Amino acid sequence: MSLSLTERLKLNFLEQDRWKYMVRGLGTTLLITVVAAAIGILLGFVIAVIRSTYDKTGHLKILNAVCKVYLTVIRGTPTTVQLMIVYFIIFSSVNKPLLSAFIAFGLNSAAYVAEIVRSGIMSINPGQMEAGRSLGLSYRASMWYIIIPQAFKNVLPALTNEFIVLLKETSICMAISLKDLTYGSTLISSQTYDYFLPLIMTALIYLVFVMLLTWLFGILERRLRSNERR
């Protein structure tokens, strides 16, 4: 006998408080996204500055070579494989799935953030750097106060897309048995034998947070543009 939609909702989410699986999983997903994004931004900006400095001046040759190898490896291998290498090989003796996710997703995001930011830096008119140097600023100060703020405005839409991809990519954490949002939905399905509603609910939750992230970055972009016109 088939159940009604109301009965299926009750079975999947209300009975035995199964909705808590998804709430706890959502918390894990958001935590991984935030920490990995922070790592990605910090490391990505550093790599972008090193790469663009080499492109503009020819300095930092060795660091640039190291960064190129890092970017090639990270962008040339699947995120799932990177996550499994970090968990099953690097941290095989300590069993730290959450830490493994932080590091794997952070390093992965940094590679893409670096190239996004580097493209933004290289798009800035060279005269901007020359103007900063003519005012007595060092190369580092000119980069920090003049070039990077302008580059950040230019690449903000691309960074938004990167963080959206990062949020969705966390769903592969099941590969290391990390109890994220997707894991929560599959755990419910394994108990109720109903895959439709848990997975649809998971998809809707991801969609809501992607829309929220897009909206927040849209507000930031409009404010930066308005400040630019003043």
Image (cartoon, helix red, strand yellow):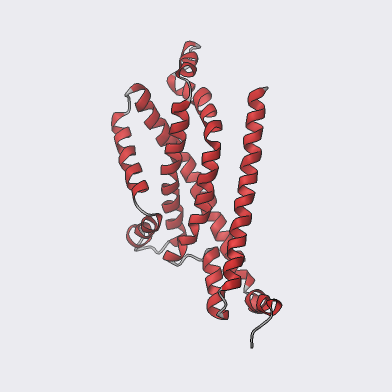
Residue at the bottom extreme of this rendering: 1
Residue at the right extreme of this rendering: 6
* Residue toward you, 109 or 138: 109
Q: Is residue 50 above or below residue 194?
A: above
Q: Is residue 107 above or below residue 172?
A: above
Q: Quadrant of the C terminus?
A: top right
Residue drawn at (46%, 37%), measured in percent from left and top? 116
Residue drawn at (52%, 47%), measured in percent from left and top? 163
Residue drawn at (47%, 59%), measured in percent from left and top? 98
* Residue toward you, 149 or 91: 149
Where residue 75 appears, as percent x and y from the top left, is 37, 47
Where residue 4 appears, as percent x and y from the top left, is 69, 80
Q: Quadrant of the N terminus?
A: bottom right
Q: Quadrant of residue 205?
A: bottom right
Residue at the top extreme of this rendering: 134
* Residue toward you, 184 or 76: 76
Is residue 61 left or right of 115 when viewed as pictured?
left
Where residue 197 appears, as percent x and y from the top left, is 61, 71
**Number of numbered discs visible in the structure rendering:** 0
Residue drawn at (55%, 75%), measured in percent from left and top? 189
Q: Is residue 144 above or below residue 136?
A: below
